[in-house]
Every structure is written in structure tokens, then in C-alpha cells.
Amino acid sequence: MSAEPSLRKRERTRLELLECAKEVLWVNGYFGTSMDMVVAASGLTKGAFYYHFPSKHALAAAVIDEAVAGELEQRWLVHLREAENPLAALIGIFRRVCTFTGSDLRRGCAINNLAQELSAVDEDLRQRVDALFTRWIDAIADGFTRSQQRGYMKRGADVRRVATFSIACFEGAISLGKSSHDPAPVGLALGSLIDYLEALRTTPSQRPARAGKEKLS
Amino acid sequence: MSAEPSLRKRERTRLELLECAKEVLWVNGYFGTSMDMVVAASGLTKGAFYYHFPSKHALAAAVIDEAVAGELEQRWLVHLREAENPLAALIGIFRRVCTFTGSDLRRGCAINNLAQELSAVDEDLRQRVDALFTRWIDAIADGFTRSQQRGYMKRGADVRRVATFSIACFEGAISLGKSSHDPAPVGLALGSLIDYLEALRTTPSQRPARAGKEKLS
Amino acid sequence: MSAEPSLRKRERTRLELLECAKEVLWVNGYFGTSMDMVVAASGLTKGAFYYHFPSKHALAAAVIDEAVAGELEQRWLVHLREAENPLAALIGIFRRVCTFTGSDLRRGCAINNLAQELSAVDEDLRQRVDALFTRWIDAIADGFTRSQQRGYMKRGADVRRVATFSIACFEGAISLGKSSHDPAPVGLALGSLIDYLEALRTTPSQRPARAGKEKLS
Amino acid sequence: MSAEPSLRKRERTRLELLECAKEVLWVNGYFGTSMDMVVAASGLTKGAFYYHFPSKHALAAAVIDEAVAGELEQRWLVHLREAENPLAALIGIFRRVCTFTGSDLRRGCAINNLAQELSAVDEDLRQRVDALFTRWIDAIADGFTRSQQRGYMKRGADVRRVATFSIACFEGAISLGKSSHDPAPVGLALGSLIDYLEALRTTPSQRPARAGKEKLS
DNA sequence: ACTAACGGGACAGCCCGTTTAT
DNA sequence: ATAAACGGGCTGTCCCGTTAGT
């Protein structure tokens, strides 16, 4: 019907289900979420659900691999990939997180929530969540490398190490915010992290001339 | 039989139960743990369990307030309190965590596990967990202040900020380790943190002469 | 298959469940009845049961409002409503109860059983049971009024008072029968009640001529 | 210590327990009462309880045979036995019940409560409760006989029949009061019963002269 | 592709009664 | 005689998943 050939109803329902499930799982966790909650949130029925997903486990796997991965892509990876200076882009994202209010923080980070709950309990889901962490850290490390190549970042730093450090601090900061219902610790921890990362940037005078322009600084 | 006549059987059983429950909850989380699991782990029966605790919720509250708080005290707070140079003591603890193997990391941090799972779901338990985070950060900040007063730490740093930053990095690092079943990211993240903290120490020549000697360096 | 396409399977199962539950509750009472007993009696499973009723309380409410009210309607109210002389109809019903054997009496009166057990314990269910008593007494009082208007019953009597008196005696008589497993006290008590009610009837010579004829005398 | 040689502590505790149990059973019924409720009401512990009674069943049996029977004796049988005119005494009791408020009626009649709940479910307890009913009706019938012998009651009436009728009406009236939380139906039903019984009394002129004087009239 | 209805097992908590130790 | 602690089974409810019927 539409230009994009309607994506087939089937796929639309599946994605709808996935999105609802992501929201519910994000807040309540895997064991704290019942299939009835997912089904009720989607407005469909159980039969419809089990037509699209064979089990709760499979749903969680799809949520991780598709919905959560999608958010990771949208909120982090695209910006890192497309930025002239990924280091600056990363700092920009952290700065924006510092402005979150208590209610934004209450749900925490979907990836970390699932990681904490499932890692020791379900090997398959653990690996899927871990793959997201890896992709995330890789994207940051790659971004750092590009920033270095373009002269925006000091050469000395071990990009993988700084990337891991950044994600660790970020996740820990979000954890503290979620636990305290208070943005203050997030600001303190991320503030320190931002200072740390700022110290890795080059001053304009240290940068060689370049054709393109950085987008986020 | 003993001098103190069995030191109240009641208390012994309760503590036994608490310890078992802590272990099971640590690994499986709150919703992933059934009372039957706790009871089986303790070797007692349900009747006995519910004689000591009125509900699963109350058990979790007691585990947080007593068992987990006890571990926090033993593994962190005592060392920070008794050290001549708490900053050095903290670095020492982080260094030791860097030597953990994958299997040590698999359970993650009990405080963070519970915080992640319960914060959005149970307000009472969230507050109890948050109190532990607060106590932890306070103890580190207080330690930093003492290190500064004794000349072991540079004066400029905002102790509360650095303490929050340290816990955030630590928790995030443990999360990555738990999720990846691999000590490598822990080493990377904590290594960076240790570097950061080392930069806050004074060199011997900067320190005024003192009577006592630092214990952990 | 049928004209009305299975008249909603749902309603059929629900009514089946309701009927079974009424039987079990009648004999064993609310607290003496377990959900397993109801489920076993119905031949269904717990999952099926809780699809139709959200709780034991809701089941009891539905049993009172639907199944027990249905029996009341069938055994009493229709006869009172449709009789040319409701006073005579009532006496007829009491006469038939006098012929019950011990085993008929063993279960007692469903309304009274539930009233006795639940009144002091569950306000919601108490009100539902009480509504049945009210409907019952009202129907008898209305019948008496019609009997008076048609000349079958003496004018002096306070219809509401006699109706309440009749139900009280009836319930008490059934209680004695249930407790003693013996129809004798039922015969004695209801016999006296019947005598009392007979004394309220008019003799044919006292009655004005009427078009219709009384159905139950 | 006291004149009555303290009745042995053992017996006192047992009676205390019995009295508490009667109160709790009266309101909550047999299945609605847990041993913990009884124990809590008595202020003792489970161990103490099970020293005096081997089982819940045995407790209920003792409550019926002793505590409830005691109340029956005190509130009814003594008055019937000692009255010059037992018929008048009975009417007096019914008159007093008519003045009860809603809250007095809420618990209903202990004998009837237990009879309704247990008759179909526990043969042993049913027989014990039934024995109370029998004793009660017998006492009234005997009283009627004495009233007749002394000229206070018309000779024609079948005393056993009237006694059964009276108890049935009384129990039914109390049931209605309990179920409705309203004294009105009790007043209506018992009022009719009182009228009925009054009609069985002799007028002074019908009475032969006698030596003694009637106590309750 | 989706709904209504159902199956059966698991879970938290309660309950009756026992044991151990005074 | 009484208290503290415990054993084990049962109850009401929920939950994951399946099936019959469009």
C-alpha cells in the first residue's frame, strides 16, 4: 500500500510486541515481568503473542538483539560513527545525561539492567547482552581512533582502555542514579569522567589543519 | 553447654538463614529466588523459615541491612577506617580486585545486583540498598579527607566527587566483568581508575613529617 | 453447530463451575472448601478456574448472586409470584418441606449456611447474602398483600411481620433438622408455623366472588 | 490461697484457654479460626495450649461441651428451672433479646453458628452441638409442663412441639439479625413468637389458687 | 494471524502439630 | 507446665505455554 510495501502486517505486529516488551522488561526485569503484563501492554492476546514468539526466553532474546540494540544504535552508535570528532560527540552525550532528572534515571540503563539480572542465571541471554556491551565499547574505541587520526585526541591514550573506562563509569553512574532516585551522584561521577576525557582532547593549536569540520564539540 | 548458654539458638538459626539467603539472592536475584531455594540451601524447612521471617520481603530487607551491610563493612569500611592513608588503602583494594578471575566476577556486586533489580520495583528495598551506597561513598570521602589532612592526598580534589566517581567506576567495572565473564574489562577500567587516584597522591617530598606510618600503600 | 453458535463456550463453563462450587460450598462452607475441591468437582483445572474467576471471594460472590439466587427464585419466588393465592402457595411449600427425609436436611439451607459462616467475617459477602434474605421476605410479604387483596387472607395481619416470622421459623427449623439429622424437629416447628398461617386464611364464605381461581391451595 | 483451694493452676489455665477459644470460635467459626489466633488471644504459647488439648478438634469439643454449654445453662436453663412460671420466664428472655442492638447480634448464637458450620462436616462435633439443642428444647418443654401443672399455661398445647417451634423461631430470628446487622427483623420475628406464646398463657381468672409466687412474669 | 479457553505446575505464605529444653 | 523452635503439608493465586476454533 505505502511506498515501503507496508512491511507486512506480520512484521508490524511483531515489532509492536517487541517495543512493548522492551518497555516492560526495562522497568520490571525479566523475572519481574509476566507474559500477561507484556500481552496487556500490547493490547493483544496471549495467542497472538505466542504466534510471534515461541517462549519468554525467545522474547527476551529478541528484545535484546533488536529493540535494545536499536536504542543503542540510535542513542550512541550513529553519533559516534557520523561525528567528525567522536570524542567530542561522546562528551556531548555524557553532558546531556548530566541534565537528566530523577525520573529519567529511575529506569536505569536497559543493557545494564538485563546484564545484572541475567548474567549469572541464563548463559544464552548473558552472551547477547555482552555482545551489546562489546559493540558499544568497540564503537567508542573506534571513534577515539578516528579522533586521534584527525588530531582531536592525544595520541598516547590506549583507546580500548579509555573506552572501557568510560562505559564502566557511565554504567556505574547510572546505577547510582537509579538506586538513589537522585541526579546528584550522576552529575558528580559523570562530571569527573568528562573532566578526564576533556584532558585527552588536543587544543586547537595542537591540531593539524583539516578539510572537514567537526560537528559536535 | 558453653559459657553463654548456646547464645540463643534463635539468633544462630536466623543468622544461618540470613547467610544462605544472601548467597542465593546474590546469584539469582530477588525474583529469581524462590523461598524453596532458600529453605533448601539452609537445610531447614518452610515452617522453620517463616518462624524467623514473616515474608520474603522481610528476608530481603534483613539480608540487605545485615548480611550485605556486614560484607561491606568487612571488605571496605574497616580498611578505610583503620588505614593511616585511606586513599592508599582504597587503591590497594582496587588492585586486589584486578586480580580476580572470571569465576570470582560471575556473581557481581551484591549491592549493585539488588539495586538494579529492585530500585524501580520496590521502594522500601530500594531505600535500604541506597543507604548502603551512601554509607560506602561517605566512608571513602571521609577517608580521603583524612588522607588530605595527613598530607597523603592533594588538597585540591573534591573528596565527595572523587568518592562517587570511584564507586561508579568500580560498580561499572564489576558489571562489565559479570556480563562478559572475563576479567579483562575489569582490569582495563579499574586500571584507569587506579591511575586517576594515584595522580591524587602526594609524593613523599610533598608530605610533611608525621609520627605514625601508613599501613597500606 | 447450533443456531446460536455454542452460546459462548465461556458462559457454559462458567455456569458449570458455578453450579459445582455451589454444591461444594453448600456442604463444606466457605472456609471448609478449598479451591482444589471446587476444581476437582468440576473436572477442570486450576488454570481454567482462574480464567473465569479472579479469586475465591469472587467465586463465592458469584455463587451467592447467581447460583443461590437462582435456586431461591426457582423454589420460592416463582411460586409466590404466579400463585393466585400466595399464602396458600407458601403453606404448600412448607408442607412439602415437612416430608423431607434426614438426608435431604443434612445440607441445610444454602442461604443460611453462608449467612452464619460469613456474616461476622466478610462484609461484602454478608451484604450479598442479606440481599437474598431481603428479596425472599419481600416476595412473601408482597404475596401476602396480594392474598389479602384477593380475599384469601385476613386483613388484620402485618404482612411484613408475618413474612419475617415465617422465614425465621423456617430457617430455624431447617437448622434443627441439619443439626439433628432428623426430620422430626422440622415437622414439629414447621407444623406449628403452618397452623399459624392457616389461621390467617379466610374461609370460603368470607371470600368475595372472584373471576380467577387459585392455583395452589 | 483462696477459700476455694485455688482450683489448681492447671484447671485455671485450661478454663482460660477454653473461654478465649469460645470467643474466637464464636466470631470466626471453626475453619476460620487458627490455633495461632486462639493462642494469641489467650496470651499463652502453642506449647502451653497443646499441653492442655491434644488437637483443634478436641478443643472445639471441649468448647461445645463446657463453655457453650455453660452459657446455655446460665442464660436459659437456670431461669427456666427456677422460675415459678417457666413460660413467662421464656417470654421474658425473648423480650430482652428484642432490645438487643445491631452490634449485639453480629456474632449470632454460638450454638447455631457451630451447628451450621460443622453438622455436615464433622460427625462428632455435630452430635455434641445437637446434644445442646436437645437439652435446650427439653428444658423448655419441661418448663412448659410445669407451667401447665401450675395453671399458668393452657393444657391443650403439645409442649414438645411448642418448645421446638420456639427455638426454631428464635434461632431463625437471630440468624436474620446476624445477617442483616439490623435488630428490626429480630423484633418482628420474636414479636410474633411472643404473641404466639402469650396466647398460650392462662388469664388470672383461669388459674387455680396456689401457694408459691411466680418470679418472672 | 489471532482469540478464547484451558492445562498443570510453581510460588508465597499459613496452619496444625511436635520436639526440645527447661 | 510452659516457652522456643521447628517439620511438613496444604491453600489461594499466578504464571508459562498450548489448543480449539475461526
Image: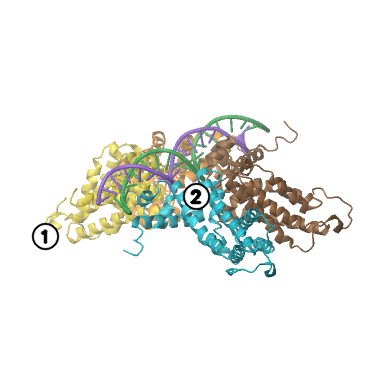
Chain colours: A cyan, B brown, C yellow, D orange, E green, F purple
Disc number lying in front (1 or 2): 2
Determine which residue is flagged by label 1: C210
Residue A66's spot in the image, x, y percent?
46, 54
Identify which residue, B44 or A106, lies in the foreground.
A106
| Quarter occupied by residue C134 | bottom left
Q: Residues within 10 Å of mark 1 (few under 14, many from 20)?
A: few
What type is the residue that disc 1 sits on? Arg
What type is the residue that disc 2 sits on? Tyr
Q: Chain of mark 2?
A: A
| Marks 1 and 2 on same chain | no
Identify the element where label 1 is drawn: loop
Residue B176's spot in the image, x, y percent?
60, 50
Q: Is residue A8 left or right of residue B210?
A: left
Q: Is residue A136 left or right of residue C196?
A: right
Residue B202's spot in the image, x, y percent?
81, 57
Identify which residue, C166 or D37, lies in the foreground.
D37
Q: Residues within 10 Å of mark 2 (few under 14, many from 20)?
A: many
Asked whether the residues under the numbered discs 1 and 2 touch, taking CB atoms below 8 Å apart as contact, a structural biologist would say no
Determine which residue is flagged by label 2: A30
- Looking at the image, is B134 positioned above or below residue D87? below
Q: Is residue B6 left or right of residue C168?
A: right
Residue A56's spot in the image, x, y percent?
44, 47
Q: Is residue B212 left or right of residue D106?
A: right
User: Can the viewer see residue B93 in this picture?
Assistant: yes
Q: Please count the marks in the image.
A: 2
Identify which residue, C143 or A38, lies in the foreground.
A38
Identify the element where label 2 is drawn: loop
User: Can the viewer see residue D5 in this picture?
Assistant: no
Mark 1 to mark 2: distance in Å?
A: 77 Å
Residue D3's label in the rendered image is none
Q: Chain of mark 1?
A: C
| Quarter occupied by residue C145 | bottom left
